[in-house]
Image (cartoon, grey):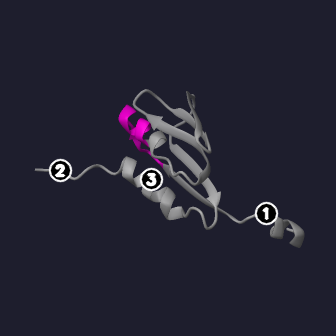
Amino acid sequence: QPKEVRETHPAYISWNTTNDIVLTRAQLDALIRNKPKKALRIKGFLLSERGPLELHCVGPSHSLKPVQGVSKTQLVGIGLKGHITQQDFQNWWGEITTPAPSLF
């Protein structure tokens, strides 16, 4: 990139995941409700109990719609370096997809 472009645009970080996790309705709700506040954009495909979905989040807005031909969850998140980290995205995803420990 030309030096002028590098100096006028802040640096971004990105995060991504690809997996076979099938989300429940409760997990989908939590995913949207708890998305990182400093994320600029999150987009991709999710596997759900009701079939695959396409997710788009831009700032506080989001859309979630059915899609065909998707066999894996694939998500990408971006944010401004210094405002959000890859670990913030990973913590968000992990809180939703990691099973709670058994009480027995």
Q: Earlier in the sequence, mark 1 or mark 3?
A: 1
Query: Looking at the rendered structure, which numbered label has been put on residue 102?
Result: 2
Residue receiving disc 3: 92
Establish if 86 lies above or below 28.
below
Q: Position of residue 93 (x, y in %)?
A: 44, 51
Q: Is residue 4 magenta?
A: no
Cα distance, mark 1 to mark 2? 47 Å
Establish if 68 lies above or below 84.
above
Closer to the camera, 30 or 50?
30
Badge 1 marks a residue whose secondary structure is loop
Q: Residue at coordinates 79% horizontally, 63% vertically from top-left?
A: 9
Tag count:
3
Q: Residue at coordinates 85% horizontally, 68% vertically from top-left?
A: 1
Closer to the camera, 60 or 103?
60
Amino acid on which disc 3 is placed? Trp
Amino acid on which disc 2 is placed? Ser
Q: Is residue 36 left or right of residue 50?
A: right
As drawn, which residue projects farthest toward the bottom? 3
Q: Position of residue 45 (x, y in %)?
A: 55, 39
Query: Are dots 3 and 2 in contact, CB under 8 Å?
Result: no
Badge 3 marks a residue whose secondary structure is helix
Q: Residue at coordinates 57% horizontally, 54% vertically from top-left?
A: 38
Using the rendered view, name the quadrant where residue 54 is placed.
Answer: top right
Amino acid on which disc 1 is placed? His
Q: Which residues are magenta?
A: 19-30
Badge 2 marks a residue whose secondary structure is loop
Q: Residues within 10 Å of mark 1 (few under 14, many from 20)?
A: few
Q: Residues within 10 Å of mark 3 (few under 14, many from 20)?
A: some
Residue receiving disc 1: 9
Q: Does residue 36 appear anywhere in the picture?
A: yes
